[in-house]
Amino acid sequence: MHYVFDTFAQANVTGLAAVKSGLDTWFFLTADYAFGQDLEKDTSNVVVKSGGKVLGSVRHPINTSDFSSFLLQAQASKAKVIGLANAGGDTINAIKQGAEFGITKGGQKISPLLAFVTDIDSVGLETAQGLLLAEAFYWDLNDDTRAFSKRFMERTKRVPTSAQAGVYSSVMHYLQAVKTAGTTDAAAVMKVMKETPINDMFAKNGRIREDGRMVHDMYLFEVKKPSESKGRWDDYKLLATVPGDQAFQPLSESRCPLVKK
């Protein structure tokens, strides 16, 4: 099974919604390994298919400390969006250094193609404001997400990321399937898991397809300005909800051997 997100969904949600809103020219800062390259490729495909243009890209070593030359190339491209096809410390450093160069103040948008609410918290709203990002979960989406997040915060003193909420959801779905099947036999449990819709704090009417992909709604957020935030962790404004069947790669394009064609 594959839960929460993949490079296709992250790219699809961000690229599709951004181009529809007029942010139709892109430049990529890409971590030079398979994950970064896939993220750039998937986002480029959706930008072009949606009528946008990719003006260029530059690849950087993983865990680099100096993004200045890469950011200057992105700034000079005049692209409306600078897509960060990286993760973790690389994303945080690129955002911080991008703010020092005044990129967002100059009118360009920076879009981290994979970031968590904890990354935004570590950067701070003053620096991160205006960022566009796709997420599978946000603690303040509805009553169910808030109730789960309150319990999580009581133990950890911070809100859950989409990855943590997704792990909780997947484990609970598995355990409920074991109970229903009356066995831990993998085939029997997986059959129940695929037959049972997922309705919890993470997903509504989520489902596990024949290829093992858990399909659910994805969200495009913009990071709030400090003046818009009511306090720590109040970081996101919801811009769009993308239904799961539009967010994830369709079965018709799947290369998974589990899919019967």
Image (cartoon, rainbow, N blue to C red):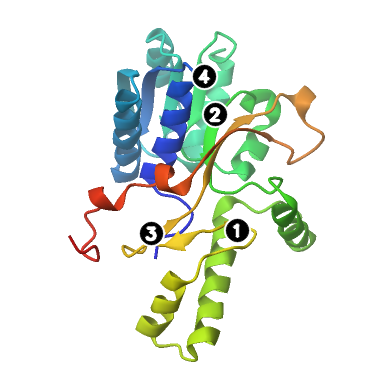
User: Residue 76: x percent and y percent?
Assistant: 40, 8
The residue labelled by disc 1 is 165
Q: Which residue is mark 3?
A: 213
Q: Secondary structure at mark 3?
A: loop
Dot 4 amino acid type: Lys
Q: Nearer the viewer, mark 3 or mark 4?
A: 3
Kindly report the distance in space between the C-alpha atoms of the residues bearing marks 3 and 1.
Answer: 17 Å
Name above or below for residue 183 compared with residue 189: below
How many numbered marks does the figure carry? 4
Locate the N terminus by quadrant. bottom left
- The residues tagged by marks 2 and 3 sit, at their Cα atoms, a distance apart of 25 Å
- Residue 204 position in % (x across, y down): 58, 56
Residue wearing tag 4? 109
First-in-chain label (2 vs 4): 4
Q: At 30% across and 42% down in the image, what residue appears?
A: 33
Q: Is residue 187 left or right of residue 221?
A: left
Q: Is residue 139 left or right of residue 95?
A: right
